[in-house]
Amino acid sequence: MTKKQRALAIIELLKNEYPDADCTLDYDDAWKLLVSVRLAAQCTDARVNIVVQELYEKYPTSKDLALADVNDIERIVKPCGLGHSKARDISACMKMLQEKYDGNVPDDFDALLSLPGVGRKSANLIMGDVFGKPAIVTDTHCIRLVNRFGLVDNIKDPKKVEMALWKLIPPEEGSDLCHRLVYHGRAVCTARTNPDCANCCLKEVCKKVGV
């Protein structure tokens, strides 16, 4: 089985297992997803979803957040960890949206990367979830699982993993696949305990279990 054949098989099996998988960060506007994905660094999505409730209640628009005192942003987001740097990135990002993009989140990958605190993972998430464009989000679940599956060979650098996956994954499947990898990585192919290979829907195609 080639890597591409394995990738296509994994896509179909995960579709069956997690048909409704989507982003686990709560948002109803593109700028809110930008904020949440920055807060999610070294923090769980569940905690982020709780913390942003106060943030958005006090600052309901991206313009409000751009005008907010950065120290107050830091106070609110502190439970997510790294509050100092995250607050400053969020403040600078919201300011740039107002000054350069009329308050709108750009739908161009390079433009997204130019925003403070936005890296390739965040930009891909926005491209896929907000704008429905081809995207591959190489978060920790994705990197761990695709190495175990044998889609990449001991590659841990997020950008290198992303580039390798672009050669294997149909563009229209990338975003949804990455969401399903998050679900699967939490439920079955976990990081802190041994993966539950015996009950895994991918055991017939996963390189880790001897295929």
Image (cartoon, grey):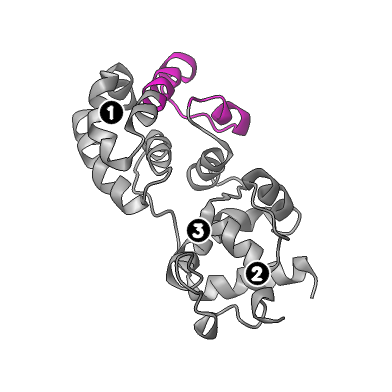
In terms of secondary structure, what is the magenta stretch mainly?
helix
Label 1: how many Cα within 10 Å (few below 14, some 14–19, many 20+)? many
* Apparent side of residue 137 relative to residue 87 in the rendered image (left or right): right
Residue 118 in picture, x, y percent from top left: 51, 32
Task: State yes or no: residue 146 in magenta.
Answer: no
- Is 152 positioned to the left or the right of 144 in the image? right
Mark nearer the N terminus (2 vs 1): 1
Question: Which corner quadrant of the image does residue 147 belong to?
Answer: bottom right
Which range is magenta?
Answer: 89-116
Q: Position of residue 47 (x, y in %)?
A: 29, 49
Do callouts 2 and 3 mark residues in contact (Cβ within 8 Å)? Answer: no
Picture quadrant of residue 2: bottom right
Residue 125 is situated, as x and y percent measured from the top left of the image, at: 51, 45
The secondary structure type at the circle numbered 3 is: helix
| Amino acid marked by disc 2 | Phe
- Tell which residue pokes out farthest to the right in this image: 2
Q: Residue at x 63, y 62 (%)?
A: 146
Q: Disc 3 designates what residue? A: 179
Label at residue 74: 1
